[in-house]
Amino acid sequence: MYTTAFLDLPALDGAGDSVQLPGSKSISNRVLLLAALSSGCTEVHDLLDSDDTRVMLAALRALGCGVQNSATGPLRITGLGGRAPQSPARLFLGNAGTAMRPLTAALALLGGEFELSGIARMHERPIGDLVDALRQLGCSIDYLGQDGYPPLRIAQAGGPPALRLHAPIPVRGDVSSQFLTALLMALPLAAQQQDVVIEVVGELISKPYIHITLELLARFGIQVRREGWQRFVIPAGSQYRSPGNIHVEADASSASYFIALGAISTPGNGQNPLKILGVGQDSIQGDIRFVEAAQAMGAQISSGPGWLQVQRAAWPLKAIDLDCNHIPDAAMTLAVMALYADGPSTLRNIASWRVKETDRIAAMACELRKLGAEVEEGPDWLRVSPLRQASDWRAASIHTYDDHRVAMCFSLAAFNPAGLPIRIQDPRCVAKTFPDYFEALLNVAHAPPEHIPVICIDGPTASGKGTVAASLAQQLGYHFLDSGSLYRMTALAAMRAGIAIDAAQEAALAALARRLPVQFDSERILLDGEDVSTAIRSEEVGMNASRVSALPGVRAALVALQLSFRRLPGLVADGRDMGTAIFPAASLKVFLTANAAVRAERRYKQLISKGIATTMPDLLADLQARDARDANRSASPLKAAEDALLLDSSALTADQAVSQVLDWWQARQPF
């Protein structure tokens, strides 16, 4: 998961192959609570691991449910089974409406003393209609802040309240379907002796989410009778029973981004059409009907059990005018697809967007305008005009409002025909439902190498280039290449493989170097998953590295290996010839230096900290001799590229040097 302040997506031009989706958030949190309310143990397979499920699991543990995690197997929940939850308890539920609303209803009926709170945005999301319904039943619930909104206190120390069930329980259906879901999941606890009836006041929005709730209730033994979408009857004698095992379907809302991706892009050379694994058109989730909307816009989609395959067909996409009540979350993706359409598209009946993680109608309108689009908005609708010409598009830095769906939607703008990059602020917000979304996107997306940004940090030994480059890569979310270690790693790999390091074995050594399983992880250097950061610094490895570097075949193989590090979303490479020989067209080149005495002191401190004995005079002499050798090499001598920016770090800390390079980089961006 990207934890950087922002993620710059370069211009992308296609996508293909396959992507595995994570479990559904809507199903995951419902299943967790239903398992917690049941008797016995429930094994939950393919549970979504995200912010929302983590806060639900933490709450269930605090309430006394057994929660047993497994690194490779299913999650095991031992339910309360009629036992009272542990009380008092304070539950922090982040921004998870799928935890806040259902837990409020369940705990109000179970009895006890509880405080339920979340982040600031959660305290702006309405819950008053649910609280009103529970108070009418006889539950004691207080607001700890603004009336109608969390945080809440449930004050029933004496146990379950005496409920008034003689009349149907009214609940508004036009604000959030989660209010009805919360009552449907909690009221079986009160239906032992008589039917419990819920009546929806007004039009019920987001009906597909109620369908999910009813399907899952049936899996846990509760057969709700539905009379249209206005009246729901929980039969007398209802009792939660664990199904033993339950599998969480992949998230249909998350599928929408990849369905859209397949509709607006084409596979690259050697790639198959984009295949989405984990959910098919037989899904119980309402957002699977996004497939119909994408087909209406021109996407070609085929499906089977647990998979969808998407290809671009009509181009530009066809404009739509659509009532989106049945796909409220996935409909956000349509707003970005509309940028690629042949005329204005209108999304209707989306009032629920206003009370989600942010006011999504306002947020989408604001960010679409940044890209250059004309957007109109109303209380429950949004109209988006396409960007018909490449010249109409603008590079933009997208504010994500701590809303996972805003971040994921706008990543699709990186496929714009103008070849412009897109900045996604706070990419970590996708942790709410799809922590590895950007990794999954970049794994199936492709771009011409010249569109993938490269920052080169060259300089003499001990100038601090490795430290600066690694930190810069971490802050940008880019890949990192420590080119100076590759010859040492090749030597170490050859020694371990028993390959003699001489000219007679040049072909074998070159083949070894070409497929060297190397990875740079912050301050660690990994060879086939093993940390060899210390091993490659031995005297024997150093001597063999010098022999290896003298072989032209090995040098050519390592050049190819270095070029292969140019991968999405970008690369920071450090070495001696990154900007002059390996990446001569790099987006930014920096030549980092420092005077020899300062570099010797830095190296001295570094070696002493690792327990390696040395002296300052020896180090200084060695550095001066090495500088002379590097500058006079016949192949790729150490020198600054003509267009490199010079940075003398003699009087700078590592953080100051990183900050300067980052400032230079930011100044070159079009946002």
Image: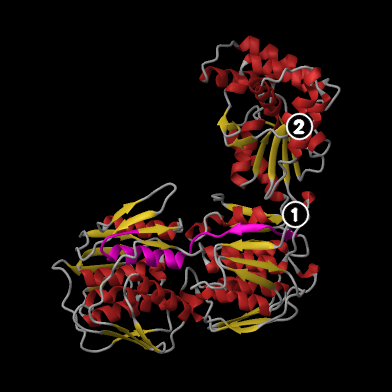
Q: Would residue 205 be found to the left or right of residue 266 on screen?
A: left
Q: Residue at x 50, y 57 (%)?
A: 431
Q: Nearer the viewer, residue 479 or 557?
A: 557
In the image, the segment drawn in magenta is 13-42
Query: Badge 2: few (under 14), some or many (20 or more) residues near its Cα, within 10 Å?
Result: many
Q: Which of the marked residues, 2 or 1, is nearer the chain's N terminus?
A: 1
Instruction: Please state which amino acid type lies under the numbered disc 1.
Output: Ala
Instruction: Tell me the quarter of the picture where residue 518 sits.
Output: top right
The residue that label 1 is drawn on is 447
The answer to whether residue 643 is above or below residue 651 is below
Label 1 residue SS = loop
Q: Nearer the viewer, residue 572 or 551?
A: 551
Q: Would residue 487 be found to the left or right of residue 552 on screen?
A: left
Q: Residue at x 63, y 41 (%)?
A: 472
The residue that label 2 is drawn on is 558
Instruction: Please state which amino acid type lies under the numbered disc 2.
Output: Leu
Q: Is residue 36 magenta?
A: yes
Q: Nearer the viewer, residue 558 or 335?
A: 558
Answer whether residue 246 is visible to the viewer in this image: yes
Answer whether residue 411 is visible to the viewer in this image: no
